[in-house]
Image (spheres, helix red, strand yellow):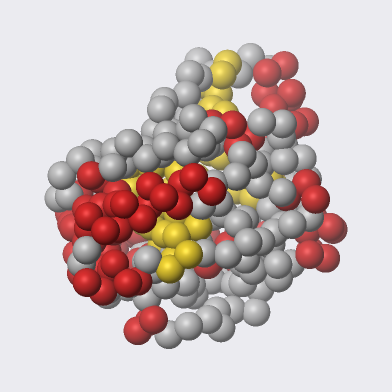
Amino acid sequence: MLQDNHGRQFHYLRLSVTEACNFRCQYCLPNGYQGPSADQFLNLSEIHTVLTAFAGLGTSKVRLTGGEPSLRRDFTDIIRATASTPGIDEVAMTTHGGRLQKFASEWKAAGLDKVNVSIDSLDPHQFAAITGHDSLKQVLAGLNTAIDAGLNVKVNTVLMSQFSEGRLTRFLEWLKETPVTLRFIELMQTGDQGSFFDNQHQSGVPVRRWLTERGWTPLLRHKAAGPAEEFYHPDYAGRVGLILPYSKDFCKTCNRLRVAANGKIHLCLFSDHGVSLQPYLKEGDVAGLQQYLQQLLVSKEATHHLHEGMTGATSNLAMLGG
């Protein structure tokens, strides 16, 4: 089992398969994607080496991220490779949802279990203003297709002061009949959006207080779960989650590691730099990679340094998928 010097065990790998995204979300890629070309990202053979190595060290959950992972033409093959790796018993993805309606059933058949869809507003005009795409109707249709296909669906929405008016009420009305978990995520500072963060950051603590005052009850956290605090209410089909990276002890239960699309491992989303795994990936050296991963975990810090404004090497969230 992968374990660091702080006693934390890592059951969960977030594997980015591309940095590219065709949305222009204000908090991530407001000017559109301008990063590396596809030939600089992990190929299927290298992905297989990563999966085999991590699974052999106790990783049981893999989340495929980007950028927008579905932009890869071989994405269904990547899902299939992940699901067929011995030891991996849960395959998830994060997506903007624009291609769900077309591919959800195919991805489910390939072995996908869970999908997180980014929906920052249920108002079409507000959604378009945030994402740069007038596609809310298409995304919601894809979400329904994913539910019908049998996928476990969660929705991510970023808390921002400019767009927050009325969102909570509208989302909760939607959850009365919609069986998904909606997670409110505090805006996190990255290297490219310092001034945007200063203007838009909003704490999720008042949302937590609002929920508990209205009868929402916390759920117990599973060992392979993400960092969200989840709540349920008997009158609602859906649930609510809160991801509060600026809260006290947020990193105490960290259980995930991140491998970027360029083959670098990031011990934290906001670490100063990634460490290349390419010498092992190019050779398909699973045993060597496993030994190297165990050595690297010794240097994992106890916490991020977001409170000091230190964002590390993460210039935008598309680099690592959050």
Q: Which of 259 and 204 is in front in this view?
A: 259
Instruction: Locate the C terminus and report the quarter of the image it occupies.
Output: bottom right
| Residue 305 image offset from top left, x and y in percent | 71, 49
| Residue 93 image offset from top left, x and y in percent | 37, 52
Q: At 26% from the left edge and 74% from the top edge, which residue is drawn?
A: 282
Kindly tell me whether residue 319 is visible in this rendering: yes
Q: Nearer the viewer, residue 13 or 149?
A: 13
Q: At 69% from the left edge and 53% from the top edge, which residue is drawn?
A: 188
Q: At 84% from the left edge and 58% from the top edge, which residue is drawn?
A: 199
Q: Please, is residue 49 above or below residue 215 in the view?
A: below
The reply, left or right, for residue 149 in relation to residue 20 is: left
The reply, left or right, for residue 230 in relation to residue 246 is: left
| Residue 238 image offset from top left, x and y in percent | 48, 30
Q: Nearer the viewer, residue 30 or 254?
A: 254
| Residue 275 image offset from top left, x and y in percent | 48, 64
Q: At 65% from the left edge and 79% from the top edge, which residue is drawn?
A: 31
Q: Please, is residue 120 above or below residue 190 in the view?
A: above
The reply, left or right, for residue 83 in relation to residue 277 is: left
Q: Which image quadrant for residue 264?
A: bottom left
Figure disc tally? 0
Instruction: Locate the N terminus and report the quarter of the image it occupies.
Output: top left
Kindly tell me whether residue 26 is visible in this rendering: no
Q: Which image quadrant for residue 86?
A: top left
Q: Which image quadrant for residue 185?
A: top right
